[in-house]
Amino acid sequence: CIEANTEVAARARQEIGWAESAQSIAPGIVEVVEGFSTEVDLPEKVDLLATEIAGSIASEEGVYATIRDAQARFMKRPYDPSSYIPYSYETVGAPATDMCHHSGGNDPSRTGVRIEAHDVTMQLLADPKLVEEICFADPWLPGSGTIGAASQLIWWIDPKRVDANRVAFTSHLKEQEAALAASGMQIADLTFDLSRSLSGIALWPRIVFDEEGSLVYDARGPKGEHQTSHWPTFLPLLASRPVRVEAGDVVRARWEVDLQDGQVMTPLRYSMACDIQGAAGRAQTSD
């Protein structure tokens, strides 16, 4: 067990001690090595690597650099999918409406927000698409440079979702209806506008445990449904204010991640730009 956080490493040793005392594991079977995996050495190469280094954007916690280093230094069979748990990390994404962004409650200087996966104040406008796919046994796993999207990022604003989102926002705001009316806002008008606004492309991780894809953990439901999750959803805001959309509009996104020098401590750089083609022919661009 390799752990860089001193407090977590101490807790892991305590848990191992309890397990040994309870005879759940034999003494000496599990050892804690403290430090970043890219900075420690192991006495011999291993058969299996189990890891959890996914962020809300799967790649944001250094998985490219970490796994490339593990392939080179730790693994007996670095390009065998059975050498890794999980098999891969994915990032999926979909156009989203954020109520706080619509109301002007977000800090205008912020380019993105993290929203709990169960928070109904953010709703999706289309089904998710694959944005990133990082397979641990990939012999060509990139170490630097830029990487584009793992699939074609084209979404159609779903009229059923627009209608369902308006119902969800109405239910959420019902207790505030009197206060909104006192401020001159009608809940019906507010939720109509809210359900037709695009804040950005919501992103969240998916953990694929086997090569066949039969065992998957999704930070949201398969269609982006709300649920409790360890991982919040990341929403990069395409503009300071939401963009108006209508059912049937087409959203095309250009995604790129820059690995820079490929070092584990070097932050990655992400870019997302969207073109929105209206069903009636209007077009606009947001970055």
Image (cartoon, helix red, strand yellow):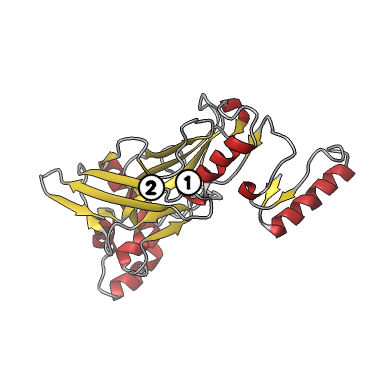
Q: Amino acid at mark 2?
A: Val
Which structural element holds mark 1?
Answer: helix
Q: Is residue 151 visible?
A: yes
Relative height, residue 202 to residue 109 (above, below):
above
Per the rendering, the mark at residue 59 is 1
Q: Please tell me in which quadrant of the rendered image residue 149 appears.
A: top left
The answer to the question of whether label 1 and label 2 lie on touching residues, with beta carbons closer than 8 A, is yes
x%, y% of residue 243? 23, 57
Q: Is residue 134 above or below residue 244?
A: above
User: Which label was assigned to residue 24?
Assistant: none
Query: Who's the residue at 68% across and 48% down the image?
Result: 40
Q: Element at badge 2?
A: strand
Q: Residues within 10 Å of mark 1 (few under 14, many from 20)?
A: many
Q: Amino acid at mark 1?
A: Ser
Task: Specify the farthest residue to the left.
Answer: 281
Q: Is residue 228 left or right of residue 286?
A: right
**Residue drawn at (21%, 51%), measured in percent from left and top?**
245
Q: Which mark is residue 257?
A: 2
| Quadrant of the rendering where the C terminus is positioned | bottom left
Q: Is residue 72 left or right of residue 139?
A: right
Along the viewing direction, whichever of 125 and 33 lies nearer the viewer: 33
